[in-house]
Image: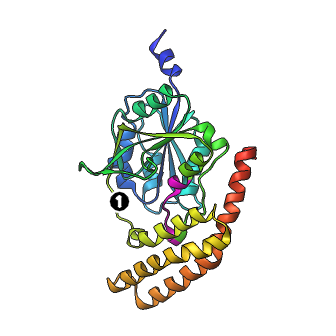
Amino acid sequence: MSDSQKIKEKPFVSVVICTQNRKEYLENYSLPSVLEQTYPHYEVVVVNDNSKDDTEKFLHNYKDAADRLKIVDNKLVKGISYARQLGVNYAGGEIIAFTDDDCIVDTSWLKDLVSAFEEDKTLMAVGGLTYDGNTSNPNLPSNGIFGFNMSFRKRVFERFSFDPNLFFHQTCYHEETDLVNRLKDHDYKTAQIKKAVVRHFPAPAEYRKIRKIAIHMNWIYMQAKKTPLPMYYYRFFKRSRQMYAIIKELYKKGVLSFWDTLKDMAWANYVLLFELPFKAKTAHWREEREFRNGKK
Protein backbone atom coordinates (compact mmCIF):
# COMPACT_ATOMS: atom_id res chain seq x y z
CA MET A 1 0.00 0.00 0.00
CA SER A 2 1.39 3.42 -0.98
CA ASP A 3 1.88 6.25 1.51
CA SER A 4 -0.92 8.26 -0.11
CA GLN A 5 -3.31 5.32 0.32
CA LYS A 6 -2.31 4.95 3.97
CA ILE A 7 -3.00 8.66 4.52
CA LYS A 8 -6.45 8.40 2.96
CA GLU A 9 -7.31 5.54 5.28
CA LYS A 10 -6.95 7.91 8.23
CA PRO A 11 -10.08 9.86 9.30
CA PHE A 12 -10.31 13.15 7.44
CA VAL A 13 -10.34 16.02 9.95
CA SER A 14 -11.52 19.61 9.60
CA VAL A 15 -9.93 22.21 11.90
CA VAL A 16 -12.20 25.23 12.33
CA ILE A 17 -10.82 28.63 13.38
CA CYS A 18 -13.16 31.62 13.78
CA THR A 19 -11.57 35.05 13.62
CA GLN A 20 -12.43 38.74 13.63
CA ASN A 21 -9.89 41.55 13.21
CA ARG A 22 -6.94 39.47 14.39
CA LYS A 23 -4.69 39.16 11.37
CA GLU A 24 -1.50 39.24 13.44
CA TYR A 25 -2.70 36.37 15.64
CA LEU A 26 -3.67 34.25 12.66
CA GLU A 27 -0.32 34.98 11.06
CA ASN A 28 1.86 34.35 14.11
CA TYR A 29 -0.11 31.92 16.28
CA SER A 30 -2.91 29.70 15.04
CA LEU A 31 -2.34 29.24 11.30
CA PRO A 32 1.37 28.30 11.34
CA SER A 33 0.87 25.79 14.16
CA VAL A 34 -2.29 24.25 12.73
CA LEU A 35 -0.71 23.88 9.30
CA GLU A 36 2.34 22.09 10.75
CA GLN A 37 0.58 19.05 12.19
CA THR A 38 2.15 15.61 12.10
CA TYR A 39 -1.30 14.20 11.33
CA PRO A 40 -1.48 13.89 7.53
CA HIS A 41 -5.16 13.97 6.52
CA TYR A 42 -6.90 17.25 7.32
CA GLU A 43 -8.13 20.64 6.15
CA VAL A 44 -8.29 24.03 7.88
CA VAL A 45 -11.53 26.04 7.70
CA VAL A 46 -11.13 29.70 8.70
CA VAL A 47 -14.34 31.63 9.26
CA ASN A 48 -13.58 35.33 8.78
CA ASP A 49 -16.29 37.00 10.83
CA ASN A 50 -16.64 40.27 8.86
CA SER A 51 -13.18 41.56 9.82
CA LYS A 52 -12.46 45.24 9.14
CA ASP A 53 -8.68 44.99 9.23
CA ASP A 54 -6.51 43.21 6.63
CA THR A 55 -7.65 39.71 7.67
CA GLU A 56 -9.57 38.99 4.46
CA LYS A 57 -6.72 40.07 2.20
CA PHE A 58 -4.20 38.17 4.33
CA LEU A 59 -6.19 34.94 4.22
CA HIS A 60 -6.84 35.00 0.48
CA ASN A 61 -3.13 35.65 -0.18
CA TYR A 62 -1.87 33.10 2.34
CA LYS A 63 0.64 30.64 0.89
CA ASP A 64 -0.49 27.16 1.86
CA ALA A 65 1.80 24.67 0.15
CA ALA A 66 -0.36 21.68 1.08
CA ASP A 67 -3.54 23.41 -0.12
CA ARG A 68 -5.35 22.67 3.14
CA LEU A 69 -6.85 26.12 3.70
CA LYS A 70 -10.54 26.80 3.13
CA ILE A 71 -11.79 30.36 3.76
CA VAL A 72 -15.37 31.27 4.67
CA ASP A 73 -16.11 35.01 4.50
CA ASN A 74 -19.00 35.62 6.88
CA LYS A 75 -20.70 39.03 6.61
CA LEU A 76 -23.31 38.36 9.32
CA VAL A 77 -21.81 39.09 12.73
CA LYS A 78 -23.92 37.02 15.12
CA GLY A 79 -21.33 35.82 17.60
CA ILE A 80 -18.95 32.92 17.95
CA SER A 81 -21.71 30.29 18.19
CA TYR A 82 -23.01 31.30 14.76
CA ALA A 83 -19.47 31.44 13.33
CA ARG A 84 -18.55 28.02 14.75
CA GLN A 85 -21.71 26.49 13.28
CA LEU A 86 -20.93 28.09 9.93
CA GLY A 87 -17.53 26.43 10.06
CA VAL A 88 -19.21 23.09 10.76
CA ASN A 89 -21.45 23.56 7.72
CA TYR A 90 -18.41 24.06 5.46
CA ALA A 91 -16.31 21.32 7.04
CA GLY A 92 -15.73 18.14 5.05
CA GLY A 93 -14.13 16.08 7.79
CA GLU A 94 -15.64 13.18 9.70
CA ILE A 95 -14.03 14.72 12.79
CA ILE A 96 -14.23 18.47 13.40
CA ALA A 97 -11.69 20.12 15.71
CA PHE A 98 -11.76 23.70 16.97
CA THR A 99 -9.11 26.10 18.16
CA ASP A 100 -8.98 29.91 18.38
CA ASP A 101 -6.98 32.46 16.41
CA ASP A 102 -4.94 33.42 19.51
CA CYS A 103 -3.79 29.85 20.22
CA ILE A 104 -0.76 27.74 19.34
CA VAL A 105 -1.41 24.00 19.03
CA ASP A 106 1.23 21.32 19.50
CA THR A 107 2.39 19.61 16.33
CA SER A 108 0.85 16.32 17.51
CA TRP A 109 -2.44 17.94 18.58
CA LEU A 110 -4.59 16.46 15.82
CA LYS A 111 -2.90 13.07 15.98
CA ASP A 112 -3.65 12.82 19.70
CA LEU A 113 -7.29 13.89 19.31
CA VAL A 114 -7.88 11.44 16.46
CA SER A 115 -6.19 8.63 18.39
CA ALA A 116 -8.72 9.08 21.20
CA PHE A 117 -11.61 8.73 18.74
CA GLU A 118 -10.03 5.67 17.12
CA GLU A 119 -9.38 3.95 20.44
CA ASP A 120 -12.94 4.47 21.68
CA LYS A 121 -15.60 4.34 18.98
CA THR A 122 -18.26 5.49 21.47
CA LEU A 123 -16.59 8.86 22.07
CA MET A 124 -18.49 11.76 20.50
CA ALA A 125 -16.45 14.72 21.80
CA VAL A 126 -12.83 15.06 22.92
CA GLY A 127 -11.07 17.99 24.54
CA GLY A 128 -7.39 18.50 25.24
CA LEU A 129 -5.32 20.33 27.83
CA THR A 130 -4.95 24.09 27.42
CA TYR A 131 -2.31 26.26 29.11
CA ASP A 132 -2.21 30.01 29.67
CA GLY A 133 0.46 31.09 27.22
CA ASN A 134 3.86 29.60 27.94
CA THR A 135 3.08 28.97 31.59
CA SER A 136 2.48 25.65 33.30
CA ASN A 137 -0.98 26.82 34.41
CA PRO A 138 -3.68 24.69 32.77
CA ASN A 139 -7.24 25.82 32.11
CA LEU A 140 -9.53 23.24 33.69
CA PRO A 141 -13.14 23.52 32.48
CA SER A 142 -15.79 21.94 34.64
CA ASN A 143 -16.95 19.60 31.88
CA GLY A 144 -13.46 18.86 30.54
CA ILE A 145 -13.73 20.71 27.23
CA PHE A 146 -12.83 24.29 26.25
CA GLY A 147 -13.73 25.97 22.96
CA PHE A 148 -10.13 26.56 21.89
CA ASN A 149 -9.26 22.86 22.27
CA MET A 150 -12.17 20.61 21.36
CA SER A 151 -13.26 18.13 18.72
CA PHE A 152 -16.40 16.22 17.72
CA ARG A 153 -17.47 13.49 15.36
CA LYS A 154 -19.27 15.31 12.57
CA ARG A 155 -22.38 13.19 12.94
CA VAL A 156 -22.92 14.93 16.30
CA PHE A 157 -23.99 17.97 14.28
CA GLU A 158 -26.75 16.03 12.56
CA ARG A 159 -28.68 16.32 15.83
CA PHE A 160 -26.99 19.18 17.70
CA SER A 161 -25.75 22.66 16.91
CA PHE A 162 -24.15 25.63 18.66
CA ASP A 163 -26.78 27.95 20.12
CA PRO A 164 -26.48 31.47 18.59
CA ASN A 165 -28.57 32.95 21.43
CA LEU A 166 -25.46 32.74 23.66
CA PHE A 167 -24.50 36.26 22.64
CA PHE A 168 -25.45 38.53 25.52
CA HIS A 169 -23.68 41.87 25.86
CA GLN A 170 -21.93 41.67 22.48
CA THR A 171 -19.79 38.78 23.57
CA CYS A 172 -20.08 35.06 23.95
CA TYR A 173 -19.12 32.61 26.63
CA HIS A 174 -20.15 29.07 27.42
CA GLU A 175 -21.16 28.13 23.86
CA GLU A 176 -19.03 24.99 24.08
CA THR A 177 -20.25 24.30 27.63
CA ASP A 178 -23.84 24.50 26.44
CA LEU A 179 -23.22 22.08 23.56
CA VAL A 180 -21.21 19.58 25.60
CA ASN A 181 -23.77 19.62 28.41
CA ARG A 182 -26.53 18.87 25.92
CA LEU A 183 -24.50 15.96 24.55
CA LYS A 184 -24.11 14.58 28.06
CA ASP A 185 -27.83 15.06 28.78
CA HIS A 186 -28.50 12.70 25.87
CA ASP A 187 -25.87 10.18 27.03
CA TYR A 188 -23.25 11.02 24.42
CA LYS A 189 -19.78 10.13 25.69
CA THR A 190 -17.14 12.87 26.02
CA ALA A 191 -13.57 12.90 27.32
CA GLN A 192 -10.54 15.09 27.97
CA ILE A 193 -7.06 13.86 27.08
CA LYS A 194 -3.94 15.55 28.42
CA LYS A 195 -1.72 14.79 25.43
CA ALA A 196 -3.56 17.14 23.03
CA VAL A 197 -2.02 20.45 24.13
CA VAL A 198 -2.97 24.00 23.14
CA ARG A 199 -1.43 27.22 24.45
CA HIS A 200 -3.76 30.20 24.68
CA PHE A 201 -2.43 33.76 24.35
CA PRO A 202 -5.58 35.88 24.96
CA ALA A 203 -5.82 38.63 22.37
CA PRO A 204 -6.80 42.12 23.56
CA ALA A 205 -10.54 42.70 23.18
CA GLU A 206 -12.90 45.40 24.39
CA TYR A 207 -15.46 42.86 25.55
CA ARG A 208 -13.05 41.41 28.12
CA LYS A 209 -13.82 44.42 30.34
CA ILE A 210 -17.40 43.21 30.74
CA ARG A 211 -16.83 39.46 30.46
CA LYS A 212 -18.14 38.78 33.99
CA ILE A 213 -21.54 40.21 33.04
CA ALA A 214 -21.63 38.05 29.92
CA ILE A 215 -20.61 34.95 31.87
CA HIS A 216 -23.51 35.42 34.28
CA MET A 217 -26.03 36.12 31.51
CA ASN A 218 -25.00 33.13 29.43
CA TRP A 219 -24.78 30.80 32.42
CA ILE A 220 -28.29 31.81 33.54
CA TYR A 221 -29.56 31.36 29.98
CA MET A 222 -28.17 27.82 29.79
CA GLN A 223 -29.74 26.84 33.09
CA ALA A 224 -33.07 28.46 32.16
CA LYS A 225 -33.47 26.09 29.22
CA LYS A 226 -34.36 23.20 31.52
CA THR A 227 -35.78 25.10 34.48
CA PRO A 228 -39.55 25.63 34.94
CA LEU A 229 -40.37 29.33 34.76
CA PRO A 230 -41.53 29.70 38.42
CA MET A 231 -38.30 28.11 39.61
CA TYR A 232 -36.33 30.28 37.19
CA TYR A 233 -37.71 33.50 38.66
CA TYR A 234 -37.05 32.28 42.18
CA ARG A 235 -33.58 30.83 41.69
CA PHE A 236 -31.90 33.13 39.25
CA PHE A 237 -32.82 36.46 40.70
CA LYS A 238 -30.70 35.34 43.65
CA ARG A 239 -27.76 34.94 41.29
CA SER A 240 -28.62 38.19 39.49
CA ARG A 241 -27.60 40.11 42.60
CA GLN A 242 -24.06 38.93 41.97
CA MET A 243 -24.25 40.37 38.48
CA TYR A 244 -25.54 43.72 39.74
CA ALA A 245 -22.64 43.79 42.20
CA ILE A 246 -20.26 43.27 39.27
CA ILE A 247 -21.82 46.18 37.37
CA LYS A 248 -21.37 48.41 40.43
CA GLU A 249 -17.77 47.27 40.76
CA LEU A 250 -17.11 48.16 37.11
CA TYR A 251 -18.58 51.61 37.76
CA LYS A 252 -16.34 52.15 40.79
CA LYS A 253 -13.28 51.13 38.76
CA GLY A 254 -14.21 53.60 36.03
CA VAL A 255 -14.86 50.95 33.38
CA LEU A 256 -18.51 52.06 33.15
CA SER A 257 -19.75 55.64 33.38
CA PHE A 258 -22.69 56.59 35.61
CA TRP A 259 -25.09 56.59 32.67
CA ASP A 260 -23.67 53.33 31.32
CA THR A 261 -24.20 51.79 34.75
CA LEU A 262 -27.85 52.85 34.81
CA LYS A 263 -28.28 51.63 31.25
CA ASP A 264 -26.69 48.26 32.05
CA MET A 265 -28.86 47.85 35.15
CA ALA A 266 -32.02 48.55 33.15
CA TRP A 267 -30.85 46.28 30.36
CA ALA A 268 -30.07 43.46 32.78
CA ASN A 269 -33.52 43.73 34.41
CA TYR A 270 -35.26 43.62 31.04
CA VAL A 271 -33.20 40.63 29.86
CA LEU A 272 -33.67 38.66 33.09
CA LEU A 273 -37.40 39.31 33.27
CA PHE A 274 -38.42 38.82 29.66
CA GLU A 275 -35.87 38.14 26.93
CA LEU A 276 -33.67 35.51 28.56
CA PRO A 277 -36.22 33.01 29.93
CA PHE A 278 -38.39 32.99 26.83
CA LYS A 279 -35.44 32.74 24.45
CA ALA A 280 -34.15 29.86 26.58
CA LYS A 281 -37.44 27.99 26.50
CA THR A 282 -37.81 28.46 22.74
CA ALA A 283 -34.24 27.29 22.16
CA HIS A 284 -34.71 24.21 24.35
CA TRP A 285 -37.86 23.23 22.45
CA ARG A 286 -36.05 23.66 19.12
CA GLU A 287 -33.00 21.72 20.32
CA GLU A 288 -35.06 18.79 21.55
CA ARG A 289 -36.98 18.66 18.27
CA GLU A 290 -33.67 18.81 16.38
CA PHE A 291 -32.33 15.93 18.48
CA ARG A 292 -35.39 13.77 17.91
CA ASN A 293 -35.74 14.38 14.20
CA GLY A 294 -32.34 15.49 13.01
CA LYS A 295 -31.85 18.76 11.16
CA LYS A 296 -34.29 19.68 8.43
**What residue is at 59 percent from the left and 53 percent from the top?**
162
Left or right: 28 in relation to 159: left
Q: Quadrant of residue 188?
A: top right
Q: Position of residue 261 (x, y in %)?
A: 45, 86
The residue type indicated by label 1 comes to Ala
| Residue 76 is covered by the magenta coloring | no
Please say if 229 is above or below 112.
below
User: In terms of secondary structure, what is the magenta stretch mainly?
Assistant: helix
Task: Please report the bounds of the magenta region as a residue range.
Answer: 169-178
* Residue located beneath label 1 in the image: 203
276 vs 104, nearest the viewer: 276
Q: Position of residue 110 (x, y in %)?
A: 42, 34
| Residue 171 is covered by the magenta coloring | yes
**What residue is at 51 percent from the left and 54 percent from the top?**
177
**What residue is at 51 percent from the left and 15 percent from the top?**
5
Which SS class for mark 1?
Answer: loop
- Furthest-bottom residue in view? 258
Q: Quadrant of residue 33?
A: top left
Q: Is residue 78 visible?
A: no
Q: Position of residue 192 (x, y in %)?
A: 42, 41
Q: Quadrant of residue 104?
A: top left
